[in-house]
Image (spheres, rainbow, N blue to C red):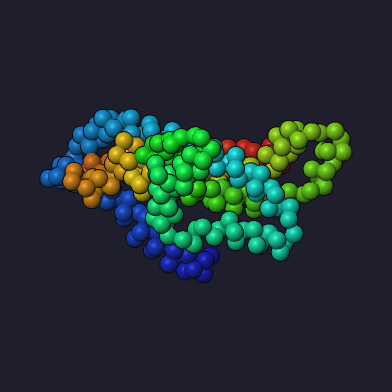
Amino acid sequence: MIKNKKLASPYLVWMVLFTVVPLFIVVYYAMTDGAGRFTLENLMVIGGYSSVFARSLLLAMEATVICLVIAFPVGYALSRLRVQKQHIMLMLVMLPMWMNFLLRTYAWMGLLSINGPINTLLGFLGLGPFTMLNTSGAVVLGMVYNYVPYMILPLYTAMTKIDQSIVEAAQDLGADMKNTVTKILIPESMPGIATGITMVFVPAVSTFVISRMLGGGSNLLIGDLIEMQFLGNSYNLNVGSAMSLVLMVIVLVCMSFTTSFDESEMEGVM
């Protein structure tokens, strides 16, 4: 027991210094004014940005759902390949992540611009040009492109543990594709789904680079507001800390929901 405590002590020190202390600082600034006096005014100010919070949650949920729809068949297909091919395909999935996040997002600015290659191609087909940049759709597209690997990997890991004989038995008993997916693949891969939702939704709801580069000034998200309070002209540590605190609560609620959902599904399987 003493040995275990000694082994855990570096981790505990790390958690205290880089998790507990910063969290305490955020709470302190969120609950005080510029003179250090206790106040709830910072939290009340956030009410004026309710539309931004709602937009952030909506776009993050849309991106998470789209990532799940894309990643589910991809994860299943990868899990059924031979091991050598799995490694090659996983490398291709992760290959864009080796490039700088800003460069990946900046590339989409060129692709979606009014004179970009997408509108040029549509012009040859007699369509467009369409205004795709500086829209909420462009923000969702940027989120999906940047975060879909975080959905594919957990689903792939969960699906590799599914016994293929179960799927074949269901098909032999007359189960069609719909029943196979809804009654076997989805329940068996629920841990991966819950993990993927958390890994995509959390960075999507707090992003600010994607919304700034692809959404323009009319698509502000929570992350943009927080950045403006700390680095912008409206410099206000207290209000920024209050926004960060609210964002942390939102993230914790979402994580607790997916965790409880995952545990209930695992109990049903067991």
Residue 216 visible here: yes
State the residue at coordinates (54%, 38%).
Answer: 125
Q: Residue furthest right?
A: 172
Tell which of 221 and 230 is nearer to you.
221
Q: Seen in the image, is 179 located left or right of residue 57? A: right
State the residue at coordinates (34%, 37%).
Answer: 219
Splitting the image into 4 quarters, where does residue 194 fall?
A: top right
| In this view, 12 is above or below 262 | below
x then y, percent, for residue 43: 26, 35
x then y, percent, for residue 135: 39, 36
x then y, percent, for residue 126: 51, 35
State the residue at coordinates (51%, 69%).
Answer: 3
State the residue at coordinates (54%, 51%).
Answer: 150
Tell which of 189 and 177 is nearer to you.
177
Look at the image and tell me in which quarter the C terminus lies: top right
Q: Seen in the image, is 236 located left or right of residue 93? A: left
| In this view, 135 is above or below 155 | above
Residue 203 visible here: no
| In this view, 100 is above or below 108 | below
Give the number of marks. 0
Tell which of 158 and 96 is nearer to you.
96
x then y, percent, for residue 188: 69, 43
